[in-house]
Amino acid sequence: MSRIRFEWNVESQQVERFDSEDPQAKRRRRRNMLLLVALVCTLLAAIALGLMFVRQRIHEVETQFAQLLQDTVKAEVAALRIGDLNSFLHVQNPNNLAWINHQRAMFQLYSDLKTDGAIELTGSILAVAIDGERARVLVQENINELPYTRLWFYRRSGEGWRHIAPDPSFWGEASTVESASVLVHYRAVDQEFARQVSAILQDWINSGCVILDCGDLPRLIIDVVPEAADAAAWIDEAALRLQIRSPYNHIARADTPFDGSLQLLVSRMLAERLVNEHTGHLTAAYPHDAYFLRNAAIAWLSEVFTRLDSGAALMRSLVQNYGDDKIAQLLTQLSATSDMSILEAVVDEPLEGADLDWRDFIEWRLQLENELIRARRQNEWLSLYDTSDENARLAAYQRYNDSAAAQDYRVLDQLVWSKPDGRPQLRATVQATGADGEEIILFNLVNGVWKRAS
């Protein structure tokens, strides 16, 4: 036991001897460690402060450039407002003569709008995007008390920001918006426009396919692009792929960039595509009544989509007085050479007693007569007349031989009544373009077709 204790004591003394350290050396080591940590912290703090300074400086410079850009835009708008052409041209890109000439024309356009009291140059800046030395700005102006926006592009040089021609490469990042039946590809500038296009066209497809049999319709794909020859055009009509030019290429409504005029165009294209799907891509033969009926059905469907008057009076009255299914029924029965008598089967009564508005049909017939006279297509022209009436036939030939200047007619009123001999007649009150007075033109119903009789 005494030997074990001895060994233990020896080991304890060794441990104490190994663990012991000069206190001063220990303090020096701790102090050096703290100095090193302090040095590292100081260095990191200096780097952080340096980065913060650089970042702040960059922010200040960017803010300065942004303020200079806004000042440039406001100066440009002010020059337009007071009619100072020199100041206006001073902020334009001087290295592009075509752009200078374009802006001269724009200055004159603004001057004309101001003279008419039709424009208010608010100078309101709705959005700004800056990428290095280039920038784009959405500027609001009110035309006829409605808010519009223009997209202006700028480039920065040693002389400051200068207004340059539209830059399609700076239209923003590509993105998409989609719904059940519509996929829209667009760039950042057109975000709100694309959102409206997606929602509205989805509603159009839903309502159109309730009215007509759309069959196995593919998904509608819309490509919104900065530049295009046409405001809207099919890239592949069969595959239902449509290209729409960005409204910011010229001018856009601030609240509704997918505005009425563009809606009318796109709705007409979609309506025609749905009618083609329903009819198996029937091609109506000009100048048969089928040509008018097909186009009238397309115009009416466009009117259903946009709730804007398309002038489709006959189709509108057909639906209002005989039911929502009559358009589909008419198109199903339509052939390439159908005449107006096809409507008797659709409304299930003689046309002289049908509650239909013939105004747009009469306008088309009068226009068609002018076209056939100019083309010297005598047989087709003569088929528009009730040749059983000798006086009407002689007057018609006189009109054909005179080849008088074509006139556009607007039908103001119609009255269907019975002649003394019991034959139905349509009395149309019309006004020629540029004429002061009104004219009465008569049409007789011959085998279910209205034919001119005066």
Image (tube, rainbow, N blue to C red):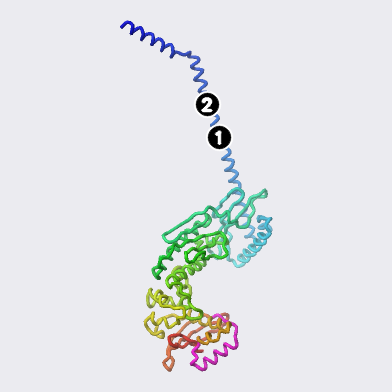
Image quarter for residue 399? bottom right
Q: Any magenta on residue 449?
A: no
Q: Is residue 412 visible?
A: no
User: What's the residue at 41%, 86% (across, down)?
Assistant: 352
Relative to 206, is 263 on the left or the right? right
Q: Nearer the viewer, residue 210 or 34?
A: 210
Q: Position of residue 436 (x, y in %)?
A: 56, 82
Relative to 320, is 147 on the left or the right? right
* Range of residues picked out in magenta: 384-408
Q: Which mark is residue 261?
A: none
Name the residue that disc number 1 marks: 49
Q: Position of residue 70 (x, y in %)?
A: 59, 52
Q: Secondary structure at mark 2?
A: helix
Q: Nearer the viewer, residue 166 or 107?
A: 166
Q: What's the residue type where badge 1 is placed?
A: Leu
> Circle 2: is it few (<14), some (14-19), or many (20+) Cα within 10 Å?
few
Q: What's the residue type where badge 2 is placed?
A: Ala
**Outermost residue toward the top?**
2
Q: Position of residue 324 (x, y in %)?
A: 38, 73
Q: Any magenta on residue 392?
A: yes
Q: Secondary structure at mark 1?
A: helix
> Circle 1: is it few (<14), some (14-19), or many (20+) Cα within 10 Å?
few
Q: Nearer the viewer, residue 64 or 242?
A: 242
Q: Which mark is residue 38?
A: 2
Residue 383's place in the image compared with 293, above or below, is below
Instruction: Report the quarter where the N terminus lies.
Output: top left
**Outermost residue toward the left?**
1
